[in-house]
Amino acid sequence: TIANIIGDIKLLISQTRNSTPLVTILLEGDPGSGKTTMACHMANQTDFPFIRLCFPKDMIGYNENAKIQFLKKTFEDAYKSRVSCIVLDCIERIMDYTDIGPRFSNMVLQTLLVLLNELPPHDHKLLVIVTTSCKYILKHMHMLSVFTKIINMPNLSRPEHVLACLIQSDTFPDQLIDIQTGMTQNRQICIGIKRLLSIIDFSKQIPEPETRLNRFLSDIYVQQH
């Protein structure tokens, strides 16, 4: 569950702060499962004096050498603080991975392997949170062994998960019972939180309550096909 994931990451944050000089976390799961949101949220929860969020969009237009220098500088800046946190979002995109071939930047991969294995200076601590939608690719690249902990971000799979999101977002408060009734137990739900929030926002634009309800229920199940 999400509560268990948050609990595990909090323990790893404490481990970084109190004992282990280098802790690396891999958050893996389907696209839209909430990995980036979780990584950024937990990084901000650390209250570490240095927090750096690195996204593939930050490196648009960078050639291989420029990416390597960007990554090296990010870690070097982190080493200047006694306790630091770095988020590397969608690591396969940072490595320019494409499954047509497949192709990727081996130089960027080797740089990441070195940086994720290298201990920070004496008496300094570093937490690195990495996200990926392609765990199997990292396995083929022999990257999984560098991570202290690998955590799966699951899709929402039960009606009560969807209802919890609706209650938390205060969406359709007058239709919760109808939605609960409409979500039958014999139909499988498997949807990422990002996709669910998009469906909620879309459904809110429909003025007729009955049409809104039917469209919402249709869209959360259409993901199965």
Image (cartoon, rainbow, N blue to C red):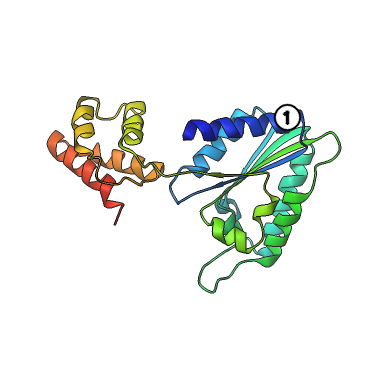
**Residue type indicated by callout 1:** Arg
The residue depicted at 23 percent of the width and 32 percent of the height is: 180
Helix, strand or loop under label 1: helix
Q: Is residue 42 left or right of residue 71?
A: left
Q: Is residue 95 visible?
A: no
Query: Is disc 1 surrounded by few (<14), some (14 to 19) or many (20+) residues within 10 Å?
Result: many
For the residue pair 41 and 57, the one nearer the viewer reads as 41
Q: Is residue 165 visible?
A: yes
| Residue closest to the far right | 122
Q: Is residue 64 above or below residue 196?
A: below
The residue depicted at 18 percent of the width and 31 percent of the height is: 178
Q: Is residue 62 left or right of residue 160?
A: right
| x and y percentages locating residue 162 in the rendered image | 33, 36
Q: How many marks?
A: 1
| x and y percentages locating residue 60 in the rendered image | 57, 57
Find residue 171 and report its image quarter.
Answer: top left
Q: Is residue 103 above or below residue 220?
A: below
| x and y percentages locating residue 148 in the rendered image | 68, 44
| Residue under pointer 1 | 17
For the residue pair 199 and 207, the one nearer the viewer reads as 199
The residue depicted at 40 percent of the width and 41 percent of the height is: 193
| x and y percentages locating residue 52 in the rendered image | 65, 40
Q: Is residue 114 left or right of residue 215?
A: right
Q: Is residue 25 left or right of residue 216?
A: right
Find residue 65 and report its image quarter.
Answer: bottom right
Q: Is residue 174 above or below residue 70?
A: above
For the residue pair 63 and 216, the one nearer the viewer reads as 216
The residue depicted at 71 percent of the width and 32 percent of the height is: 15
